[in-house]
Every structure is written in structure tokens, then in C-alpha cells.
Amino acid sequence: MFKMNQLTKQINKVSTLVTSGCFMFGAITLTTLSGCEKFLEMPLKDKVPQESVFSDEQGFMDALTGVYLGMDKPQNGPTKGLYTNDLSVGALSVMSNNYSNASSSAISDGMYANFAKYDYNQAGVKQEIAYIWSGMYNNVANLNNLLEHIDAKESVFTRDHYARVKGEALALRAFFHFDLARLYGKSPVTGMNEKAIPYVTKFGSSSVPFVTLNTALESCISDLNEAKSLLAKADTASLQEGSLNLFAGYTQNHMNYWATKALLARAYMYKGDYANAWKNAAEVIGSNKFPLSTSNVAVSTNTTRDRLFSKELVFAVYSANVGSINDGMFNLSTGTSLQFTNKTTLYSTGDWRLSWFDKNNVNTEVPSKYFQNAGLPYIMQNIVPLIRISEMYYIAAECANNNGDLAQALVYLNKVRNARGLSSLTSTDASSSAALSLEITKEYKKEFFQEGQTFFYYKRLNKDLKAETGTTVNVPADAYVFPIPDKEVEYN
């Protein structure tokens, strides 16, 4: 069994995202590991022992825990980790040209080099893209299984846990489908009414028809609005770190109420609905629950380096693999780590985000955003940002700009600039809508370095990928669209 200090450490981070989350719940309630183990081992195409998984509140919590774990390494999922690698520091960052030497890198048997060339037909890349698809839909299937049983078992829940579990499950289902649509569908500028992905709401092995990008986005928004109504009954009052109510702890690592509203802002923005995007973004900002930094908490002279500006994270995924993932990309003892040699071109002097670069163990400067310093407080360890409050400011700025209110747009944009050590832009700096849009683009490039969201921003606006990234490789016309896996084409 676990040593006492290991158990204590895990209890201190009572998140449903940790690898041993099922053990923590079991240890506190004096039950066994069997519920979570059964859930994590469920074969999706076989008959599931539902009575043993969904017989009580704990079973539903364990099932939801399994999905959060699947955001890192889902069953039948990618070899490199889902949101902890491929969709953050890995493939999407490579395709945004966050690493100057990616196209010649031998890391992962050259897979990143091929992602950098947008060669989606190369065997390793093609397989990883198929694994991303299957991993995401595996998570969706597990959520649908939970959702199909939860209403009939509402009476087994205590406190507000029914609303929390169902609300988070619906929001996560939207979260996964939204990213599937952003990966495998066309840009909304060119393909809003073209088939994109299946939007799956039932558990089972039956094929589900593909729907248009517009329909997929509408389904995401519908799920999110239902989730928002449920979560409004549970977790709007405050953000919890530790809690005697274990399931309510560390809410920034849950798909919480504010994360649901933030995802609504993101989805409405992708759809081109500026009014609703602004409404939801402004409400998340106005909650004042994710304060922008007032000092450089990431600077190397700090005793505790908060490289991720963690108080600003609306939603983040936890994984004990973060350190090893980043060591394998940026801190190699032999071979060449991924590097970024253009930081002074991207970041101006005084930008606190320059603290995201350090020398590795062979004295090479590399991106260090996810490095795990010795003595790092547990709340700051092993997390990967999925939604930042800064994005809500950028969305609000873009919406104001679209509405012709350049002054208000500058207010939103300058809030983040000031929170990164930069001076405010003036109406002279951004005297037109086009000039302001350029400044917003610059901020996306700087803020979401190594997080994957820059690629999605380019795709939403159908920007010239070669011009924006500065890549020297040839960018094919279909670079924004991951190919549908062969097995899906064959069987669906």
C-alpha cells in the first residue's frame, strides 16, 4: 500500500484528476479501489457491469474521475498524452512553429518533424491523429455512459453532487466535441456548413452520422447551457483549493461553472456570434475569481516560480506526467532538445513571459513553461492550462473591436498587457480596427506559447498559416484539417 506521506500528499490535492484519485476517495470513505478500477477497465464495445459501477454516488464520481484521467492518457488514445502533450506542448505547438528546430528534430522518432511539415500522411503522424480521435471519443463514450444512468440514480447523491457530476459531464462532453470539431472540421470561415464530426450523445457501438460544423457547435452550446444551469446550483460562490468536501476541492482542475461559461465564450466566438461570446467572456471576467497578476510571479529570482500564472487559470488538467513529458522534449542530456530562438522577436524587453525560457541541464536555452522546480507548491505542480482568464479579455477585446468600439477593445487588451509587465497601447498604437486586430494576434502568439490555442485562433480566422507562424516549410492547403481516421471512414 501507499506510504502515509504519499497518501497525505494526495489528500492535500484532492482533485479528481490525479492518477490515484480513486484511491484518495476510497481512503477517505473507507471503501475500496474496485469502483474506479472497474470503470477504467470497462471495454466500451462490450456489455458493461453497470450495477457495480453506478450503484452509488462514489461510482459516479469514480466514473467522472476516469474521464479526467483520460484527458492525459485515455484508453486507445495517443501515445504522447492528449491534453498534456499533443493538444498543448506537443503537436499543436509544433504546428504553430513554437519551436525553431522542430522540422529537423529527431524527438519521438521524428514525429514532431513531420507535424512541423504538416505531413499528416506520414505513418507516425497519421497514427497519432487517429489516436487523438479515438482517445477523445473514448472519453465521450464514458461520459455518455455516466449520463445515461445518472438521472435514475439521483436519489443516491448527497449535497450538491448530482448537479456537480452531471453538470461537469455535460460540459466535458461539449469540451471534447468542440476540440474534435476544431481539429477535424474545416475553418468556420470556409466550412461552417460542411460535414465535420459525429456529435455523439448516446452510449453504444452504433455508428453516428457526421454533422456540419455549425450543427456540432450548436450541440456544444446546448450541452454547455444545460451544464451551466446545473453547475449554477453547485460551485459559483468560490474557487476551492482544499475542502472537507473532497469532491468540491481544487475546482480549477474541474470543468467548473466558470470554465463552462468560458467555453461558451470560446464556442460562440468560433461560431461568429460576437454578442454571446462577449456576454459570457465579460461574465467570467466580472466574477473577479481569476485575478490577473500584478507582479512577475514567474521570474527566476522568486523563491517559488509560478511560471503558469496559476491564479489566472479557469480550467487546467492535472497529470503526474508533466515533468517527464517536458524533460523528454526540452531537457535532454543527449541529443537536441526543442528550442525557440526567436523569443526576442516575439517578446519585447520587460515582458514577464520571457521568464518562460531557461537553460536546461546541458546549458541550452529552451522553453521552460512547464518545468517542475524542486519545492514547487503542490497546487502549482503538474498542471497544463486549458482555459486562461486572459483569453476572455482577448475575446472581449475582439468583440468590442468588431462592434467598432476601439477604445473599449484597448481597455480589455491593455489589462492583460499590464499583467505581463507591458505598457498600455494607445489609440495611436491601434488607430484602426485592422491595427487593433494585429495587436490581438500578437498577444495570442505570446500568451498561448506552448498551449495550442494559437493554432486554433489562426484556424478560426483562417489566417495564412505560413505568414503567421514564420515557418520555412511548405504549408499545404489542408494544413488546418486533420484527416478522419481510416477506420472511422470505413465503419461510419
Image (spheres, helix red, strand yellow):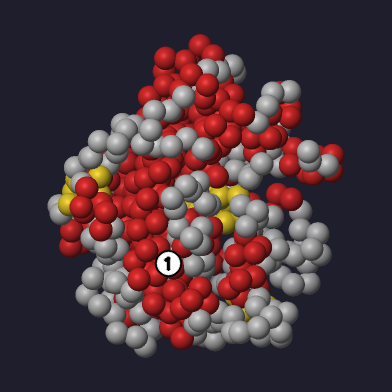
Of helix, strand and loop, which one carries label 1? Answer: helix
| Amino acid carrying mark 1 in the image | Leu
Q: Is residue 256 above or below residue 344?
A: above
At which x and y percent is residue 52? Answer: 52, 21
Please tell me which residue lies in front, 163 or 149. Answer: 149
Q: Is residue 230 above or below residue 221?
A: above
At which x and y percent is residue 484? Answer: 26, 58
Q: Is residue 472 left or right of residue 250?
A: left
Q: Quadrant of residue 420?
A: bottom right
Residue at image point 74% right, 42% down: 10
Q: How many marks?
A: 1
Please tell me which residue lies in front, 150 or 389. Answer: 150
Please tell me which residue lies in front, 369 or 202. Answer: 202
Q: Is residue 199 left or right of residue 247?
A: left
Q: Is residue 16 visible?
A: yes
Q: Quadrant of residue 383?
A: bottom right
Q: Is residue 169 above or below residue 253?
A: above
| Residue situated furthest top in the rendering | 155
At which x and y percent is residue 464? Answer: 28, 76
Name the residue carrying label 1: 92
Q: Is residue 108 above or below residue 128?
A: below
Q: Is residue 373 left or right of residue 349?
A: right
Q: Quadrant of the N terminus?
A: top right
Q: Is residue 237 left or right of residue 278?
A: right
Q: Residues within 10 Å of mark 1 (few under 14, many from 20)?
A: many
Residue at image point 25% right, 78% down: 476
